[in-house]
Amino acid sequence: MSRAELEEFFLSLGEPKYRSTQVFKAVHERRLVSFEEITDLPKKLRAKLEESAAISRLAVESRYVSTDGTRRYLMKTADGYPVETVFIPTENRDTICFSSQSGCPLKCDFCLTAKLGLLRNLTVGEIVEQVIIVLNDVYGVAGETPHGTNLVGMGAGEPFLNFDNLIAALEIMADEDGLFIVPNRVTVSTAGIVPRIYDLAKLENRPHLAISLSTANDELRDRLMPINKKWDLDELMTAAKEFEGSLRRGERFTFEYVMLGGVNDRDSDANELVRLLEKYQLKKVKINLIPHNGAEQLDYNASTAERVSRFKSLLESNGVDAYVRQPRGRDIYAACGQLAAKSEANSAAMN
Ligand code: SAH
């Protein structure tokens, strides 16, 4: 519930308004997971809440810990659908990668989540609770988060097909009486749901944007990411251009590019990408090259390290900033494109 909904709820119970702030803080700032623990509420009210409400609607089924410290959480909704969340620590920053849908309706050919199909959209509560569960696991209930937390909406699902819930969840997580993870620390990624890119551009408190591009060629993109048949590169780049116009001073946005050996990693592919950015005069962009994470059901090979580095320098020599995303948690199926609710991991890495 948003703060307004929570207020409404307490009023409907015949309780004073300030109770809603008390409970909001208990759930989001102190990260308490049951009404029982909110001992500053009268016992009678706690019992009443126990009957009419729930703090938690997700259960952690299993937790996998990678040799690189990445953690993958396989959770289940109250009605039995899988939800996956990933914790990615680096030396001076933690990132939590949350899911917006159970499964995914998009049929990107190189992605394992696609094999699940769409199970359902996640609720606002299910999006927020993923983050609370991870923080409580890593730092203990109500534990300090030493260097803050960045969020990425890059887990399972297409965030822009669950746009309203996504935005409502981000608003709750940004509240300074709660998790206080401000939009500036959040990046959401879309495979190219064009109308929502325009919507995001208009939002005042909005997260950063990443667009999964993966090729500058319509014909190839139709095959790799069938969503391209609905909104092609011209429509996508026109929206991206509009979005660029809404960026704050110093802000940039990202194109993600999954590197598929022999498919989209040739010199000619890099040149085509440079020309595409030039055509739409996109300047405040960076390219994130993502080495492909393989799986048995996927028919692609990762580009060689030499190819990735050659591709990167081709972009750079044309004035395009490019970075290579370091794969994390591959051994536990936690890396990009590997979230498919697998109840497996390299047993040596299990915890
Ligand atoms: N549906 C959204 C959010 C998911 S983000 C989107 O597509 O942007 C997940 C990222 O991982 C996307 O950039 C996607 O292109 C990339 N990806 C998918 N499968 C992958 C794989 N097997 N290896 C590496 N990256 C992959």
Image (cartoon, rainbow, N blue to C red):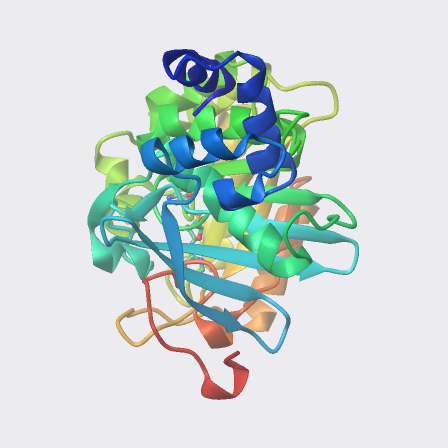
Q: Residue at x 47, y 15 (%)?
A: 15
Q: Is residue 101 above or below residue 249?
A: below
Indicate left or right for 296 with 131 as reference. Answer: left
Residue 344 horizontal/vertical position (percent): 37, 77
Q: Residue at x 63, y 70 (%)?
A: 69
Indicate the quadrant containing the N terminus: top left, top right, bottom left or bottom right.
top left
Q: Position of residue 337 (x, y in %)?
A: 40, 59
Q: Looking at the image, which residue is at 52% across and 40% down?
A: 255
Q: How many marks?
A: 0
Q: Is residue 104 left or right of residue 282?
A: left
Give me the residue at 28% from left, 49% from top: 78
Q: Nearer the viewer, residue 103 or 274?
A: 103
Residue 163 place in picture, x, y as percent:
37, 27
Task: Name the residue nearer the viewer: 253 or 276.
Answer: 253
Residue 314 visible somewhere in the drawing: no
**Residue occupying the far bottom of the picture:** 348
Q: Is residue 18 above or below residue 72?
A: above
Whether residue 128 is situated above or below residue 6 in the rendered picture = below
Residue 46 visible in the snapshot: yes
x and y percentages locating residue 73 in the rendered image: 46, 62
Kindly indicate the quadrant of the structure image that contains residue 116: bottom left
Outermost residue on the front side: it is 44
Q: Nearer the viewer, residue 54 or 210?
A: 54
Q: Is residue 268 left or right of residue 51?
A: right
